[in-house]
Amino acid sequence: MWLRNLLLISIFSLLTACGEQKLPSPFKASDVSAKYAQADFHLNDAVGKPVSLADFRGKVVVLFFGYTHCPQICPTTLADLAQVMRMLGKDADRVQVLFVTLDPERDTRELLAQYPPAFYPTFKGLSGDSMATAQAAQAFGVIFQKQPNKNGGYDLDHSAGTYLIAPGGKPVLLAPYGQRAELLVQDIKLLLAFK
């Protein structure tokens, strides 16, 4: 009897060990689809036209939150993303980089019409009032806070990841600040295959 029970326990252990194995992700960025699958924004482009994520369906959306007075993280990220676009070649036409300002007080539409495209011609700047900005940031888990600076003004401490969103809205990836351009290119090319 004990031999039979031992045999049953052994078979059960083997069967549970043969369960569905999870394959490693093909992406270099973190897949955050479960957390941000429904995330969206309702902002304005640089000419004042209302836009949301749905307006960019059919393209991979590269979404970055920052501000134009940012001393290092934002210009570095936008320069890196410009390099990504150049590396993508003809696939760059199927990618839209969106720079969402976290500083609508200082980042006017005129400034947003010039700042992102200075890095790459197709980059778009988006803005909203303080409520729309806070809602967009919250939807994507972006944290930001004003910090007084020594010049009597302020800087913004903010999250620094870049979101990569497939043409159909899923999957959603989050690349860390400083992600190498070739890894971003690899992830974007994988996302271009999603519908």
Image (cartoon, helix red, strand yellow):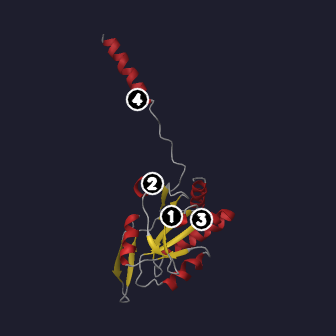
Q: The residue under label 1 is which amino acid type?
A: Ala
Question: In whole angstroms, how far apart are the C-alphas of marks 4 and 3?
Answer: 43 Å
State the residue at coordinates (36%, 72%). 134
Residue with the most extreme top position = 1
Q: The residue under label 4 is which amino acid type?
A: Thr
Question: In whole angstroms, how far apart are the C-alphas of marks 1 and 4?
Answer: 42 Å
Tell me whether the residue at label 2 lies in contact with that at label 3, contact meaning CB atoms closer than 8 angstroms. Answer: no
Residue with the most extreme right position = 90
Task: Please name whichever residue, 78 or 178, is drawn nearer the observer in this view of the structure.
Answer: 78
Helix, strand or loop for disc 1: helix
Which residue is disc 2 drawn over? Answer: 33
Question: In whole angstroms, how far apart are the C-alphas of marks 3 and 1?
Answer: 14 Å
Question: In whole angstroms, how far apart are the C-alphas of marks 4 and 2?
Answer: 28 Å
Task: Please name whichever residue, 135 or 162, is drawn nearer the observer in this view of the structure.
Answer: 135
| Residue 135 in sight | yes
* First along the sequence among labels 1 and 4: 4
| Residue 73 in sight | no
- Residue 180 lies left or right of residue 3; in this view the side is right
Tell me whether the residue at label 1 lies in contact with that at label 2, contact meaning CB atoms closer than 8 angstroms. Answer: no
Task: Please name whichever residue, 38 or 7, is drawn nearer the observer in this view of the structure.
Answer: 38
Q: The residue under label 3 is which amino acid type?
A: Val
Tell me whether the residue at label 4 lies in contact with that at label 3, contact meaning CB atoms closer than 8 angstroms. Answer: no
* Quadrant of the image occupied by residue 138: bottom left
Q: Is residue 65 above or below residue 103?
A: above
Residue 16 numbered mark, or none: 4
* First along the sequence among labels 2 and 3: 2
Which residue is disc 3 drawn over? Answer: 95
